[in-house]
Amino acid sequence: MYTRILVANRGEIALRIIRACREMGIETVAIFSEADRGSAYLDLADEAICVGSPKSADSYLKIANVISAAEVGNVEAIHPGYGFLAENAHFNEVCRSCKIDFIGPTPVAMEQLGDKNRARAIARDANVPVVPGSDGLIEDDQEAIRIAHEIGFPVLIKATAGGGGKGMRVAANDLSLKSALQQAKNEAEAAFGNAGVYLEKYIENPRHIEVQVLADHHGNAIHLYERDCSTQRRHQKLIEESPAPNLSEEAREAMCAAAVRMIKHAEYTNAGTVEFIVDKENNFYFIEVNARIQVEHPVTEMVTGIDLIKSQIRIAAGEPLEISQSDIKVQGVAMECRINAENVDRGFQPSAGKITKMIIPGGLGVRFDSHAHADYTVPPYYDSMIGKLIVYQPTRGEAIECMSRALDELQIEGIQTTVPFHKKLLRDSAFADGWIDTTFVERTFLD
Ligand code: MV4
């Protein structure tokens, strides 16, 4: 096992990783930008090294600086967290060439799955259902029109280098398909330096359900069931939960089995997420693999009792999975609300500044993962998430009650947060009944 790890991230996930390492007897080296200098969570690491100025591109994203910190800090491995360099195959490669373990999948697996069209081909090969669409990248208008007529309108054009909703375009007929195709290609080239696009049938009002997987370097791969992340707004997740409400047992088992086939076929290792969209009839379709630990990993930890960060570290160090599929049992319901420093009344505009008062909820089944505290200043340079409130209860109804109570207890003053919006969401009767899809928030709370 490692004796010393570099945490190549900031905020709540840096703290989450430091906590896991401390419990495992592993020393940690934290990195920080000048905007995060003096942040309290840095004191919990054994060492903290400045990697540059506030802008991400000049610090957390600067590979040379992060690697230098790893060398100076004398670590054996780097945990990238999520965001920043977490899914950068080049960084992953650089770590390995510097003889530093990257706590995540191999660069090859990361590269392959990072290309969405290629991931789709791997899924097809692994007998994992994909959305009806093109077999590869779209060469010209005529090919797009031919496929659209085969699968039927509306269709969705997706950038192969995209993901998370970036560079997608819906088309309803031949004419709009031609212009959407050109726009999508231009956008993809500008955003990713890769104009490749592919086509899928547009699934209306889908649910977004993802399966957590773990795979070691000894050929063992398991799933830890699903999370429903349908409660989102403009591709920003608001609430995640496990298990997914109103999902048939057959669909759940079939989706989880498909996720395992996918990662085995991709020779994927470490923790990952296989994302699906699910239609009204509980048909599920693969959309992409997230080759990292995700923000919402705690809901899976609560219902399975498995520490995913510790699992990632053990897998990277070469240990075989100590659990098999039959050991994984989901008990109860977990729900997570992302607490963002945002002004909901101003279109969820970021609200940076000093937190003047902060009271954290507690009680049975309440977990708050956050690096924030009273007197902490939320910097304007990064993601606005300042914490995750997670509850764990026997039933979904009780989880909603517990979350509402915990949100009432949570007091953050000095900045605006998404807490009031979450309280409103939890009172909605459609939400209470588990009738959630990816359009639920925008339909219900029009903005
Ligand atoms: C789709 C879709 C409908 N049909 N694909 C958006 C993010 C990216 N991961 C895939 N996304 C979607 N792909 C087909 N063929 C609808 C979405 C989608 C969505 C997916 C997951 C979570 C939130 C979403 C919000 C809007 C659209």
Image (spheres, rainbow, N blue to C red):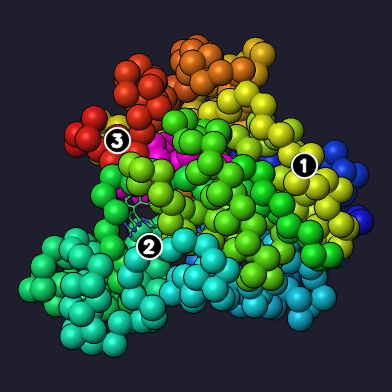
- Measured as percent of width and height from the top left, residue 291 is found at 59, 61
Q: Amino acid at mark 3?
A: Phe
Q: Secondary structure at mark 1?
A: helix
Prevailing secondary structure class for the magenta stretch in the rendered image: strand
**Residue 45 in magenta stretch:** no
Q: Which residue is mark 1?
A: 326
User: Which residue is found at the position 36% from the left and 25% from the top?
Assistant: 431
Residue 131 has which mark?
Answer: 2
Q: Earlier in the sequence, mark 2 or mark 1?
A: 2
Residue 130 position (above or below residue 140): above
Q: Residues within 10 Å of mark 1 (few under 14, many from 20)?
A: few
The location of residue 359, given as percent across then percent down, is 56, 17
Q: Which residue is mark 3?
A: 440
Q: Earlier in the sequence, mark 1 or mark 3?
A: 1
Q: Amino acid at mark 1?
A: Ser
Q: Residue furthest left?
A: 175
Question: In the orientation shown, which residue stands out farthest toward the front?
Answer: 250
Residue contact between numbered discs 2 and 1, judged by CB atoms under 8 Å: no
Residue type, mark 2 in image: Val
Q: CA distance from mark 1 to mark 3?
A: 35 Å
What is the CA distance from the residue labelled 2 to the residue labelled 1?
30 Å
Please indicate, yes or no, whether residue 259 appears anywhere in the rendered image.
yes
**Residue found at x 54% / y 36%:** 249
Q: Say whether mark 2 is within 8 Å of ligand 1.
A: yes
Out of 409 and 394, give the one closest to the viewer.
Answer: 394
- Residue 282 figure quarter: top left
* 336 up-or-down from 292: above or below: above
Residue at screen point 57% across, 56% down: 258
Q: Does 50 sit left or right of 208 as displayed?
A: right
Q: Which residues are magenta?
A: 226-240
The crowding category of the residue bearing disc 2, from other C-alpha atoms within 10 Å (few below 14, some 14 to 19, many at least 20), is: many
